[in-house]
Image (tube, rainbow, N blue to C red):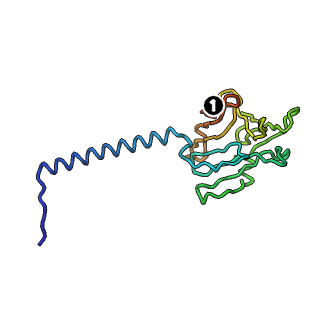
């Protein structure tokens, strides 16, 4: 024999109040989570493990893969022929390190660098995909490699770049770029967001 439980009207009303309240809490929690992720920029994306030669890295809104730029040191000095080593951390796959392809190196993520006359162990350059801002790679007074990049009109130590792109069209376009760095004098965090 099957027994059916008959709910009283008061029990049904309490059940709906609980459901509506929980639904409101779930909507509020989802909204707060969305706002948190949106405000973090690239912070919700994986970051490569720290390395002593790390200059900076680029995260992109399209996927979890990260382009890493490390100083290329030989006998404690920047390699004159190739002062920056650029490669992938493929977090969107197995998290493996992988060299850039020739096309990626020459058109997208590669750098052009030249020695700075009169400044030993210092190199000036630009991104091959974005030549408007020049940077400098050198070693600070402690011998640590740094990349100085214009952030808010002043040369700052670049640590991270986040690029938001729109790949819904035939040609991928950059919506905006966020630069995260440190002031070389005060050590304070610096930030700039711009549309290229």
The residue sitting at 85% across, 46% down in the picture is: 81
Residue 31 drawn at (x, y percent): 40, 41
Q: Residue furthest right?
A: 118
Place residue 178 in its image quadrant. Answer: top right
Q: Is the residue 5 above or below the residue 16 in the image? A: below
> Which quadrant is the C terminus positioned in?
top right
What number of labels is visible?
Answer: 1
The residue sitting at 64% across, 50% down in the picture is: 49
Q: Residue furthest front?
A: 142
The residue that mark 1 highlights is 188
Instruction: Using residue 11 as the reference point, say whether residue 157 is left or right of it.
Output: right
The residue sitting at 58% across, 55% down in the picture is: 92
Label 1 residue SS: loop
Relative depth, front residue between 140 and 133: 140
Relative depth, front residue between 109 and 154: 154
Residue 130 drawn at (x, y percent): 70, 38
Instruction: Using residue 171 as the reference point, say whether residue 80 is left or right of it.
Output: right
> Which quadrant is the N terminus positioned in?
bottom left
Q: Is the residue 52 above or below the residue 141 in the image? A: below
Instruction: Using residue 41 as the reference point, say whether residue 79 is left or right of it.
Output: right
The residue sitting at 85% across, 33% down in the picture is: 119
Residue 60 drawn at (x, y percent): 60, 45
């Amino acid at each position: 024999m099957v027994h059916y439980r008959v709910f009283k009207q008061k029990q049904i009303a309490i059940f709906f109040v609980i459901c509506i309240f929980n639904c409101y809490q779930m909507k509020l929690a989802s909204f707060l989570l969305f706002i948190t992720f949106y405000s973090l920029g690239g912070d919700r994306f994986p970051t490569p493990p720290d390395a002593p030669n790390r200059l900076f890295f680029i995260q992109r809104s399209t996927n979890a893969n990260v382009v890493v730029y490390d100083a290329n040191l030989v006998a404690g000095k920047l390699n004159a022929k190739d002062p920056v080593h650029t490669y992938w951390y493929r977090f969107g796959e197995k998290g493996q390190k992988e060299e850039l392809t020739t096309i990626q190196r020459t058109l997208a993520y590669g750098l052009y660098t030249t020695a700075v006359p009169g400044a030993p162990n210092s190199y000036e350059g630009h991104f091959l995909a974005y030549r408007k801002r020049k940077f400098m790679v050198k070693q600070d007074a402690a011998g640590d490699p740094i990349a100085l990049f214009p952030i808010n009109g002043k040369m700052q130590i670049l640590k991270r770049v986040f690029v938001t792109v729109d790949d819904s069209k035939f040609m991928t376009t950059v919506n905006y770029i966020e630069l995260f760095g440190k002031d070389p004098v005060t050590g304070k965090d610096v930030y700039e967001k711009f549309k290229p």
